[in-house]
C-alpha cells in the first residue's frame, strides 16, 4: 500500500519534470522576450539578450533581397516609445534544437500593433547558455504582409 502514494506522486511530477529540459528553458527565454515586448519593459527584454546580441531582417523589395541589421538600442527605444500596444504572437509549440550550450529555435509569428495586424514571418533565434541561463545571441526574421509561405 505504501507504493500507491509514491506511484501517484511520481505520475503527478512527470509533467513538471518534462518541462525541466534545455528546450523548455530556451522557450522560457523567448517567452520572457515577447512578454517584455508586450509590456514595453526594456529591462525584461534586455535580460534575455546576450550583450553582443544582433537583430537582423531579410528584406525583399522589388525582387531585391538583402539583410538589414537593427541596433539593439534602436530596437529597445522603438519598443519603449511605441504609441500603441505591440503583440508578437508565436505558436505555443515550435522546434528547438539544443547541443550543449547552443540552441536554435524557429518560430512563425504574426505581429499586431494597436490590435491591428501589421505583418507576419518567421523568427530564427540563436541562443547561448551562460552563467545566468539562456540568452538570445541573434534573431533573424522575415517580414511580409501576407502570411502564406514564400
Image (spheres, rainbow, N blue to C red):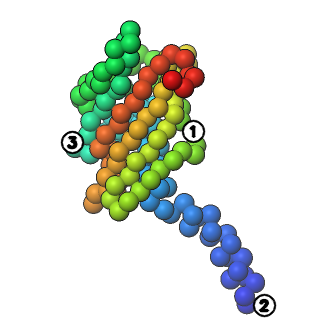
Please give the residue where the numbered disc 1 appears in the rendered image: 91
Structural distance between the alpha carbons of marks 2 and 3:
57 Å
Structural distance between the alpha carbons of marks 3 and 1:
27 Å
Q: Between disc 2 and disc 1, whose residue precedes?
A: 2
Rendered image quadrant of residue 143: top left
Q: Which residue in the rendered view is the most extreme toward the left?
A: 52
Q: Are marks 3 and 1 in contact (CB under 8 Å)?
A: no
Q: Are marks 2 and 3 in contact (CB under 8 Å)?
A: no
**Depth-wise, is mark 2 or mark 1 nearer the camera?**
1
Name the secondary structure under disc 3: strand
Where residue 37 sits: x, y (%)? 42, 32
Residue drawn at x 26%, y 26% as measured from the top left: 69
Please give the residue where the numbered disc 3 appears in the rendered image: 52
Say few, some or many: other residues with alpha carbon within 10 Å of mark 3 (under 14 / 14 to 19 / 20 or more): few
Q: Which residue in the rendered view is the most extreme toward the top?
A: 62
Say few, some or many: other residues with alpha carbon within 10 Å of mark 1 (under 14 / 14 to 19 / 20 or more): few
Residue drawn at x 35%, y 25% as measured from the top left: 58
Amino acid at each position: 500500500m505504501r507504493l500507491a502514494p509514491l506511484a501517484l506522486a511520481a505520475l503527478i511530477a512527470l509533467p513538471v519534470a518534462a518541462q525541466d529540459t534545455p528546450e523548455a528553458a530556451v522557450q522560457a527565454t523567448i517567452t520572457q522576450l515577447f512578454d517584455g515586448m508586450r509590456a514595453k519593459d526594456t529591462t525584461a527584454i534586455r535580460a534575455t539578450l546576450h550583450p553582443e546580441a544582433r537583430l537582423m531582417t531579410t528584406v525583399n523589395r522589388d525582387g531585391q533581397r538583402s539583410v538589414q541589421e537593427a541596433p539593439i538600442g534602436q530596437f529597445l527605444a522603438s519598443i519603449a516609445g511605441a504609441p500603441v500596444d505591440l503583440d508578437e504572437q508565436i505558436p505555443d509549440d515550435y522546434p528547438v534544437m539544443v547541443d550543449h550550450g547552443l540552441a536554435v529555435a524557429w518560430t512563425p509569428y504574426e505581429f499586431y500593433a494597436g490590435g491591428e495586424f501589421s505583418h507576419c514571418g518567421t523568427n530564427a533565434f540563436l541562443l547561448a547558455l551562460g552563467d545566468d541561463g539562456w540568452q538570445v545571441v541573434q534573431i533573424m526574421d522575415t517580414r511580409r504582409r501576407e502570411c502564406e509561405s514564400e
